[in-house]
Image (spheres, rainbow, N blue to C red):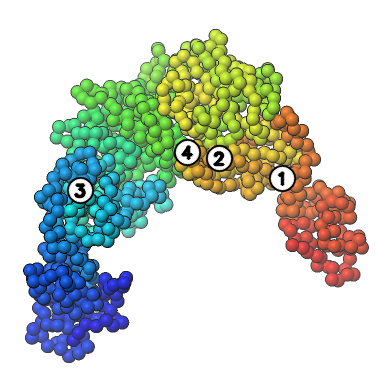
Amino acid sequence: MAFDLTDNVHHADHGRVQQLEHFQQPFVAVPPGDTALEDMADVPRVSASTAQGLADHYLHEVAPIYGIDAAMLPGNGRADSLTGPESDTGRSRLELADEKEILGTTVVSYQQKYGSLPVWEAGVSVTIQPGPMRVTASQSSVQGEVLLPEESLTAGQYGPEAITPAVLVSLLGVQSAPTLNATPCRLVYQYDPDRRFDPEARAATGERLEEVPPTLSLPPVPGGIAPQEFRVVTEVLFTLPVPGHPALNWRAFVDAATGAVLYLRALTACATGMVFRTDPLTAGGAAPAPAPTDPAATLNPFRSTVLLEGLAVASPQQLSGDFVKLVDTAPPVAVPPNTPSPAGNFFFDAPAREFAAVNAYHHCDWLFRQMAGMGFNLSTYFDGTVFPVPVDAVAFNDQVNARAPGNATGTGSGGFEFGLAGAPFPAVSIAADRRVVLHEFGHTLLWDSVHSPNFGFAHSAGDGLAAVFMDPESSLRTDPVKRFQTFPWILPDRNHGRDVATGWAWGGVNDIGGYSSEQILSTTHFRLYRSLGGDSENLDQRRLAARQTMYLIFRAIGSLAGGPITPTPNPGVFTTALMNADIGTADFEGYLGGTHHKVIRWSFEKQGLFQPPGAPTPVTAPGAPPAVDVFIDDGRAGEYQFQPVHWETTEIWNRLAPNPGGGVHETPVVGLTNHAYVRIRNRGSQPATNVVVRGYSANPGVGLSWPGDWKPMDIAQISVPGGVPAGGSAVVGPFRWRPQSIGHECMFMEVSANGDPSNIDPATFFPCAAGPTAEWRLVPFDNNLAQRNVAPVAGGGGLRGLLSSFVERRFTVRNPFDHQVRIVLKAFLPPFLAERGWTARLENGGNKAVFGLAAGESRPVAVTLRPGQDFTREDLLQAGAGVRIRVVATADGMTVGGMTYQLDPELVSAPREHADHQPIGLDHAEIDAAIRESELQGEVPATVGAGAAVAASGEGRAAGTTGGAAHHPNGDGEVGRILDRLGASEELRGRIQRVTLREVDVSIEMDTGHEPGAGNGGSAN
Ligand SMILES: [Zn+2]
């Protein structure tokens, strides 16, 4: 019986049928002599005893459906020599190519050939199920339109014999010669400009977490080759490394006639696998966290699906790629898993051997990939290592252990070996604890640079990598104990919060090398990370701090001298290497070098390095600051603990007259000459000499960059005669300056001394000194620099006084990045105001404003307040100093600056900010408007509007405000105006006792019931 298209045959039809699926209408093979199926008259069937025999018959049946010319079918015997180009299909035919069986299902496939040349990705496959043997599906990619001149099939200047590495260099437009991996061969390819490069590589890098497939910048295709034209090409398989891929395999199709590369693919595969992204304890969400030896049902929920990147294409797919390959060398025996290609999913139970392998592949590969993504050239950094390195995920005879051995000559990585995270088996592999992999990677870094797995002064920097990298997203981050356990899940005794006073100083009783000193180092690294942003409330900022710290560690280790000398006899050598890593950074993802070296030194200083001469040993105290360390106190006494707000330095202040005024700040006045002052200090042990202070003002705003936005004051620099003694201070000024805009102020001060220049001093040659360097990357990390964005507002004049300070109050937000960012502004009110029902409004909206800003763009933002309860100067004095309104700006999650408005009890109304303008009075129309609006919102007890008793709705607050004599709402106050608009008559008004305003609904209570219709009051919207 014939095979017809019925409702039981499903076909994917895109202009031409490409796929048939017919589970309910199988095409059945009846073996010769089998009578069992003969009665089923309506079943399509054929006599066949083999899969190929069945497939051949089936193909003849479905050829018309697929639009395949019968002359192309196998067995129709159209020999090459007998055909001419007059037929539509020319010399195309289908040839049996493969038969494979997977778990009982057989797939027979046919390759389309044109003459003797295969047509790329053209053919038919037939899916056959057993019992009875029957076809249930098929697909076709046959190209019916291939037509090529006879002579082109064998001709061409760039045929297989012409392809050499040297020829490829020119055809690919690359610098170094590729290695040929197979004998090139000819095939027919339909050129498609949209598929010349891997479509995956077009994904915008900003939108993808994963790396896009690597590609090359090829010379253009000559205009004579038309899109969709069939061409005879030479397929070339070769190896060519590119950054991040030390041994990358490629496929290219070279046009045989012109040499143009019409198709290029990197042969990497991305399978998916399930791993522990973090150990279950760090991941959180279960109390208590499961143990490594718990059953799969308990552990499996902690798995995540990840991409396994860089896998070399193979069938079946192996866990072997650019950087690592899974092996089985050490006992116990456990062959690494593979999956059918290309559909491979490496999903396994958490306690399984295979899960160990998948974690080992992912976590080790990911670390190399991180480094490549940071811009490190891995072939030079790991110049002694042969990639991919071997990884045995099931080693150590199932003991709890891990190792990063060297290679045979001790000059590079020999890969990784992992045991279990808990014994006995079945248990989760220690490779599933990413913290352990990070520790081992510390050794991998050292092998290539110092030809040893260890520092001279400590085991390695691996604990620091684990501590820093895992912190930003850790559920333990807010736990004061567990946050500092480096391996909380399996080894809680290793700690990166070690106390100098209890022997964990550099030079302390526990500084004995090995794991002990490694904890001193990890504590030091963790302090650096916290200061750079690891203690931020913003996840993005913590991630950036972790990435920067890891980058500095990678870079510092890579810069150490190799053997045979002991490259790091003491921590000082590594401190210097880290500081050099900073100042040598031209630009790491927008971070310009030179901004971090003082924080690095401080991190070691706080851990007991840099002891003053004659200090007692063993060390139990932090070290000494630099001999000369001039600074402006931003509240940290010259130190570098994390500071979320970097613009509130009040040791910079302004005066209207040229006298320091005891440090009391006066609001800068536009149109007048103002006088800036700063107090500088010296926390060093030596006198600071040749001390110079420079003053800058900035056109209003947040997100300011050095040097473009910092304008030198009219007196730009003042030398301090006699310098500053050790531990001393000096007030420096006046810096004459003329503010340009009202509504804000922004003053920067920079102090330098012999031996202690600021990071923006051009004599340092630091990249950050040349800039542009954003204030948020600069000011918090250099105690020689300080910024004041603190404006006094009236706190002594109650509700109207404070409101007067926010009439015309605005500032500018700038985008200091070189790309578009998402700005989030948030206003934070002090409890003093929040408890009284005050709220802030940004851009006339709520206390939060969100908008995008293009690179370098800026935008003015209005700040206003919606009043709550009134307050007195005495109330404010009782609340203590530091009652401040803060507006904080983040750009893509980074705090880039802010404005602070300090309530000043000595100001009763808005300070004058412009010489030619009248100060804002307490009766300003906008103040009335703000109060009125609050009433309409029902937020304020109204004492406004002559002759009206207005009660706020909702809260009991209303009671107090309507107490006392009732007022008839006949006056010219707000209520009177509303009643006018409602058309209330004089007579009606005379009987009104009480008016309640709520949003825009007005309800009116009448005093008597003798006008029934009026009892429900009127309302207006
Ligand atoms: Zn180790």
Residue at 86% of width from left, 71% of height from top?
1012
Q: Which residue is mark 4?
A: 817
Type of the residue with mark 2: Ser
Answer yes or no: is residue 516 visible.
no
Q: Which residue is mark 1?
A: 867
2 and 3 marks in contact (CB < 8 Å):
no
The answer to which image quadrant residue 748 occupies is: top right
Q: Which residue is mark 3?
A: 249
Type of the residue with mark 1: Pro
Residue at 47% of width from left, 24% of height from top?
760
3 or 1: mark nearer the eye: 3
3 and 1 marks in contact (CB < 8 Å):
no
Instruction: Residue 914: give x, y in percent of width and height.
Output: 71, 30
Figure check: 788 above or below 537: above
Figure check: 857 above or below 63: above
Dot 3 surroundings within 10 Å: few (below 14), some, or many (20 or more)? many
Q: CA distance from mark 2 to mark 4?
A: 11 Å
The first of marks 2 and 3 along the sequence is 3
Q: CA distance from mark 2 to mark 3?
A: 47 Å
Question: Quadrant where the N terminus lies?
Answer: bottom left
Q: Is residue 526 left or right of residue 234?
A: right
- As drawn, the residue found furthest toward the top would be 722
Answer yes or no: is residue 169 visible.
yes
Q: CA distance from mark 3 to mark 4?
A: 37 Å
Type of the residue with mark 3: Asn
Type of the residue with mark 4: Phe
Residue at 80% of width from left, 67% of height from top?
1016
2 or 1: mark nearer the eye: 2
Q: Which residue is mark 2?
A: 858
2 and 4 marks in contact (CB < 8 Å):
no
Dot 1 surroundings within 10 Å: few (below 14), some, or many (20 or more)? many
